[in-house]
Amino acid sequence: MNPSPFDLIDAGVVDLSLGLHRGTWTAVQILEAHLEQIRKHDAKYGAFLSIVDGVHDRAREIDRKRQDGRPLGPLAGVPIAIKDNICIKGQPTSCGSAFLQNFRPPYSAEVIERLEAADALLIGRTNMDEFGMGSSTENSSFGITRNPWSPSRTPGGSSGGSAAAVAARMCAAALGSDTGGSIRQPAAFCGITGLKPSYGRVSRRGLIAYASSLEQIGPLTRSAADAAAILAVISGHDQGDSSSSTRPAFGLDELSPLDLKGLRLGLPREFFGEGINPAIEAQIMSACQRLRDAGAELVDVNLPHTPYAIPAYYVIATSEASSNLARYDGIGYGRRAEAAQTLDEVYAQSRSLGFGPEVKRRLMLGTFCLSSDSYADYYDKALRVRTLLRNDFATAFDECDLILGPTAPILPFKLGSLRNDPLAMYLSDVLTVSLNLAGLPGASVPAGFAVENEQRLPIGLQIIAKPFEEALILRLATAWEMIGGFHRESPRL
């Protein structure tokens, strides 16, 4: 009953819950080991904004349930961090923005209620780019987050705090949200697994809205099995979310071992070549060759409209943000400019004080795209491109079972190096945004490392499937883990 703290922080979701069910350790021991890891290291990495109030009481209650012989949930005692745009009733939920610094929601998100029902330990709120608008977790009003593999570099964004917390063993898993790559890109940069489910697979009720037709909540973990365990709990229809699919929830019984023989893996030519870091391309091609050696078939496929994904995404996402963030007026809730005396001044000054520069940039762009003079030229055309991208994927999946490629075209970059170049920052999502536009599931899994300036930096392999085929993604990810083994590596803190 006295496990080593290292055993506890290195154990994943499945192992921690199994050990608690067996009485190998207690929820309090699990919690204390991870809180100690946060105390020792988070001042350096900035992954957390706060620890959830009452988490110790929650751990003691879980231990009492086990001692009393009451049934325990499938995630009993597992410490899970929550991105700060997912509402937890009564807990600070800022969305990384000064506008919501003191906001405490009156209800919990559907995914939070499901995690609590599964006896998970919600350990803390993680840092993020303000309102999810960013790819580096430098746009938070509450400081930057650093990559555990190299503290001078970004962990990715906007779920960078969640990714860094998992990579640094401060929690067993975390929830993030993915609007254009915000789970997968940080997972790649931090050397962990990140799953973006199909649109509608997981309820968005209680997710603070950025771009409603694009975003999904998903897990960040250290293995495919752990991602599956989280997805099995949070997926399924929610009557409170009209975009929630009525399909049956994802089940762990869908994860039978995958026979790679004859599995067709599509390699889009648009995901390789110009613009891709040569070290990343070489490592991804090596992974694909190893999968082929294990029996899979590699198939060349085309996604011809991929070059138009970034401009279409930034029209649609910013337009929806312009609509969603119109509610932040300094009156109903959130930060209010004390010096304002007229209604117009309340609106203008509150938003000027509360929003950071990246949010302002995207709101102005979205408002412009929705204006009567520009709607047909921008927003309407972007929706047409979205349809073309969906058609590209449908055609490609006629020729293959899954699509593979790099998650990001570049390695984790130096903090501050792209802050004054928004276009270069936006292009870091060039390989991820098309999935959000098409509503497809995708995951980033560890695929190896590259050395840059004597620093060993992670590389992510992106796996893409047809809608609601998360099970096939996770089955291939599990098979790849057995071949590559990179998911077992961890940074030296």
Image (cartoon, rainbow, N blue to C red):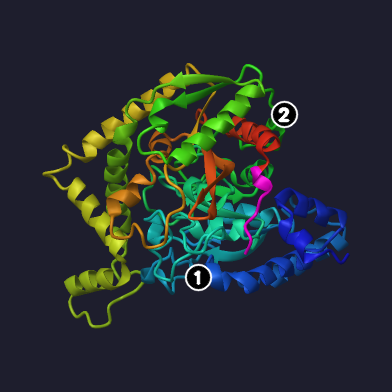
**Amino acid type of the residue tagged 2 in the rendering:** Pro
Residue 257 numbered tag? 2
Which of the marked residues, 1 or 2, is nearer the chain's N terminus? 1
Give the magenta range: 486-493
**Mark 2 nearby-residue class (10 Å; few <14, some 14–19, many ≥20):** few
Q: Position of residue 372 (x, y in %)?
A: 13, 45
Residue 416 numbered tag? none
**Amino acid type of the residue tagged 1 in the rendering:** Pro
Residue 266, relative to residue 20: is it above or below?
A: above
Tag 1–tag 2 contact (CB < 8 Å): no
**Element type where label 1 sits in the image:** loop
Which residue is disc 1 drawn over? 92
Q: In the current view of this chain or complex, which residue is farthest to the left?
A: 373
**Element type where label 2 sits in the image:** loop
Residue sitting at 38 percent across and 29 percent down? 270
Secondary structure character of the magenta stretch overall:
loop
Residue sitting at 39 percent across and 59 percent down? 131
Q: CA distance from mark 1 to mark 2?
A: 41 Å
Count the marks: 2
Residue 77, picture quadrant: bottom right
Q: Position of residue 191 (x, y in %)?
A: 57, 49
Is-magenta flag for residue 378?
Answer: no
